[in-house]
Image (cartoon, rainbow, N blue to C red):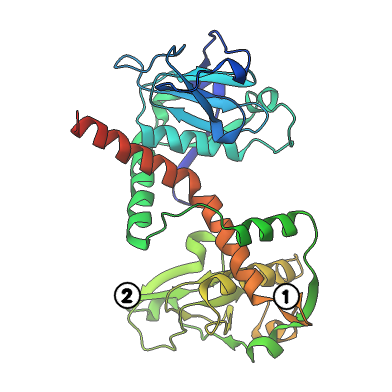
Amino acid sequence: MQQVKWAEYSCSELFQVVSGSKIKNKSELPEIGNYPVYSSDNNGVVGYTDMPTYICDESRKFYVVFGDHTRTFNIATKSFSILDNVKVLKPLQRVSLRQLLFIISSWKKEIPDLGYARHWKIAKEVKLSLPIKPNANSDKLAQIDFDFMENFISQLEAYLLVTGLKDYTLTAAEQQALADFENGKVVWGEYNLEKLFGKSTRGKRLKSADRIAGDLPFVTAGEAETGVSAFIGNQVEIFKANTTTIDMFGSAKYRNYDYGGDDHIAVVHTENLNKYEAIFMTSAIHKSSYTGKFSYARNFYAKDADELNIQLPTSNQQPDYSFMEILISAVQKLVIKDVVRYADSKIAATKQVING
């Protein structure tokens, strides 16, 4: 992603607001119907009707429905109607569902959450970043790299399939963990990193000229490619997956793979935690270590990791690993929700076509 070129676009360059009649009140909806009715609530759909206002057909396969109060985006692939507090948008260019999902995901990221206030007045003014072709011409819209968007979402779908990340429904425990976190009800305690995980390990220098091409990720300092500078075949110490690295600037990253590391990183041995606990731990470490204190002039070393104190959820004066696991599981579900919903809707649409 770091090597992709990006450009900023406004929503007016990509979409047109479409006006149409609205159903005044939810009470007007029939008990049954074939076409969805969207509002700002309930993830968009609040009922059904047999008299749709907006028609999805071969000339216009889908619309974007924006919930003003909730800043929710829904892609309508079937004819529909709306209640109040909703904006209906049609793409100005022919795009696929994958490409449209990429665009609205980029757009939503730029819209601040104002609670139940109206969001459209801000949404229509923000700039969203989209990938552009490497040899882009002066035509701004022609620069957009729709193929990249298509491939990116396709790869996400494949990843979800391989990893089994399909369930985005929050459990009662996950809902409670999110509520406690957002409402400041979590009890926090301070813990020393060395006392939790033993001494951290410093990597060893391996000059670029001495590196042999291979399959082992070799980690160094920096944000590009998450710090992986090369894939090597050298005989070096291999650090286990599910550990945390902290680079010379204090930037912490979770590693879910075996790797080697140079002398600009410290390895925190979180491998005995489960994945969710280790991810939470990495976040807590990063918050304490990446403060601007460390730089080229003052590097972060393994000894600094050993001295680092971090804030963790606490239960009975001990780290509450159960809460950490539940919270990260909930966050993961929130992150994958839009992609899974899109993938499921596409599969359902395909089955509908196959079954006639």
Residue 106: x percent and y percent?
53, 38
Residue 95 visible, this orientation: yes
User: Viewed as shown, does residue 129 lie left or right of 119?
Assistant: left
Up-down relation of residue 182 to residue 234 (above or below): above
Camera-near label (2 vs 1) is 2
Q: What amino acid is at disc 2? A: Asp
Residue found at the very far front of the displayed protein: 31
The residue to which callout 2 is attached is: 215
The residue to which callout 1 is attached is: 298
| Nearer-the-camera pick, 44 or 192 | 44
Q: Residue at x 65, y 35 (%)?
A: 111
User: Viewed as shown, does residue 57 lie left or right of 123?
Assistant: left
Residue 131 visible, this orientation: no
Q: Residue at x 58, y 25 (%)?
A: 39
Toward which corner of the image does residue 110 lie, by quadrant?
top right
Residue 154: x percent and y percent?
33, 46
Residue 225: x percent and y percent?
47, 61
Q: Kindly state the secondary structure of the residue where label 2 is placed.
A: strand
Residue 327: x percent and y percent?
62, 63
Q: Residue at x 57, y 26 (%)?
A: 66
Up-down relation of residue 171 to residue 295 (above or below): above
Up-down relation of residue 333 to residue 305 (above or below): above
Q: Earlier in the sequence, mark 2 or mark 1?
A: 2
Distance from the alpha carbon under mark 2 to that under mark 1 = 32 Å
Contact? badges 2 and 1 (CB < 8 Å): no
Q: Residue at x 37, y 18 (%)?
A: 56
